[in-house]
Amino acid sequence: MTLDIGIKELEAARRIFGDRLPLAERFVEHLATSGIDRGLLGPREVPRLWDRHVLNCAVIAELIPEKARVADVGSGAGLPGLALAIARPDAMFVLIEPLERRVNWLKEVTDDLGLENVEIFRGRAEQAVGKFQVDVVTARAVSALSGLAALTIPLLKGSGEVLAIKGRSAGEEVTKAAKIIRRLGGVATSVETVGGALLEEPTTVVRIVVAR
C-alpha cells in the first residue's frame, strides 16, 4: 500500500528508506488509520502524509551522525522520531512524549514494525534531562525556537546538536532566540534546507551546535 504517493515521492521514499520502505509504508498506514482515529493527525492530512509529514521528517536523517543516540522531543505521531528510526536503523532513538494516549500509540506502532532501535519515554522533556546520554535532539512543531531551545539543549549534557524542523519563519525565530541559545551553550546556529534533490518542497531545519 503506497497511499496517495506520487512518482516523485515514491522515488524519494526509496532513496531515503532503502530496503526498509515496506516499514515506512506500514507506518503511513498506521498514521492514516489509528493515527487519525485517535486524533494524532487530522483527517485532512491523509492525502499529504507522505510528502508533508513522513518524507519531510525522514529526509533529515542525512544530518544525523552514524550510530548516533537521538532524543526526539514531543514525538506525538512519531514525526520525526519513528520516521527517522525507520530510515536509520544504525542509530538509537528515545521518543519523549508526555501524553498517555500518544505514548500507547507509539508503543503499538513500534511493536508492530519491530523497531529495535526505539525506546519510548513518557514525560516532558525537562523530566528526561539526565536520564539519557544523547548526541542529537530532534523536534518538529513543538514550540517557538526560544522555548524549544530550553527544552532540547539541556538533554545534550553540554555537547551535541539540536535539529529542529521549522517553517518559513525559521530565520526570524533564530534571531529572537539567539540570546537564550547562547546562554544554554549553543555555539553555532544555522538555518539549512534538506532534501532539495528529492522533495518538491525541501525541509527547513534549524541546526544548533552545542559545546562546553
Image (cartoon, rainbow, N blue to C red):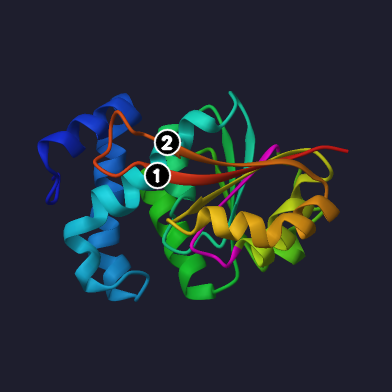
Query: Which residue is denoted by mark 1 in the rendering?
Result: 203
The amino acid sitting under disc 1 is Thr
Which residue is the site of mark 2? 194
Q: Is residue 117 left or right of residue 11?
A: right
Q: Quadrant of residue 48?
A: bottom left
Give the quadrant of the N terminus: top left
Residue closest to the eye, 143 or 154:
143
Q: Position of residue 9 (x, y in %)?
A: 20, 38
Residue 189 falls left or right of residue 131: left
**Stretch in magenta:** 135-144
Q: Is 139 within the magenta?
A: yes
Q: How far across and how far down the image is residue 183, in percent? A: 85, 55
Local packing at callout 1 (Cα closer than 10 Å; few below 14, some 14-19, many 20+) is many
Q: Is residue 5 visible?
A: yes
Q: Which image quarter: residue 106?
A: bottom left
Which residue is depicted at the point 58% across and 66% down? Answer: 144
Callout 2 amino acid: Val
Compared with 163, 20 (above or below) is above
Q: Mark 1 and mark 2 in contact (Cβ < 8 Å)? A: yes
